[in-house]
Image (cartoon, grey):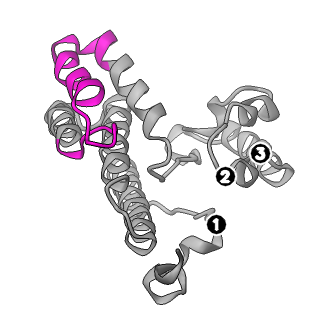
Amino acid sequence: MFVALVDSNVIQSLSDYERFPTWMWKNDIVADFVEWLKEHNAKQETDQMVGIHGLDVYSQENSQKEVLEKLRADYPSLLSNAETAYLHTKTLWGETDPKSAKKVVHEVENLYQQNPESDELFDLLQNARCVQGGAEYRTKYDPASSWNYRDTFMFITLTRLVERRSLLDGRQAKAIIWAHNSHLGDSTHTCMPFAS
């Protein structure tokens, strides 16, 4: 999202954020930063604007809702398969099946390939990937592999965002990472694998 497009009230925008870790986003530092970015972006051409993007699999449920709503509104021929994958194909633990979610990703990828400059289709694809990533994440049972899966997912998402922005703008894009310090390493080299 380009920061110029967020609500005029930054605190209100941040209050909509309900997923853990809320303390990382709902604070004065982030609010001040977003206010500064809004002012910065107001003076920029579109290709110079700064965006803020979530990278984690934790928003699987929100992403699932976004995918279904977008398909329902604009691509109804794909809706039935997505509803089946997300709502009716479950693992033994009642979670979305990663293989079924991957089929939705493939369908949206095919759609995106037809119009790779579309921000809406890119967002749809990223949301479909988040659903699949979240479903896959929930199949990881030991703390080290699940943590590293999330970190790998976030890195791949970041790479996709930077590559897309570079392609659209015709120059190498830059990124600033706002991350919790526990995501800045390999959890297999910590005491996490031994945690009960």
Q: Secondary structure at mark 2?
A: loop
Residue on which disc 2 sits: 21
How far from the left and from the top, in percent, is residue 111? 17, 30
Residue on which disc 3 sits: 26
Q: Secondary structure at mark 1?
A: loop
Characterize the local packing of mark 2: few (<14), some (14-19) or many (20 or more) Cα atoms within 10 angstroms.
few
Give the Cα distance between marks 1 and 3: 14 Å
In the image, which disc is placed on residue 180? 1
- Tag 1 and tag 2, C-beta contact below 8 Å: yes
In the image, which disc is placed on residue 39? none
Q: Is residue 169 left or right of residue 110?
A: right
Give the Cα distance between marks 3 and 2: 9 Å
Instruction: State the image quarter where residue 109 is shown.
Output: top left
Characterize the local packing of mark 1: few (<14), some (14-19) or many (20 or more) Cα atoms within 10 angstroms.
few
Characterize the local packing of mark 3: few (<14), some (14-19) or many (20 or more) Cα atoms within 10 angstroms.
some
Tag 3: amino acid: Lys
Q: Residue at x 43, y 60 (%)?
A: 154
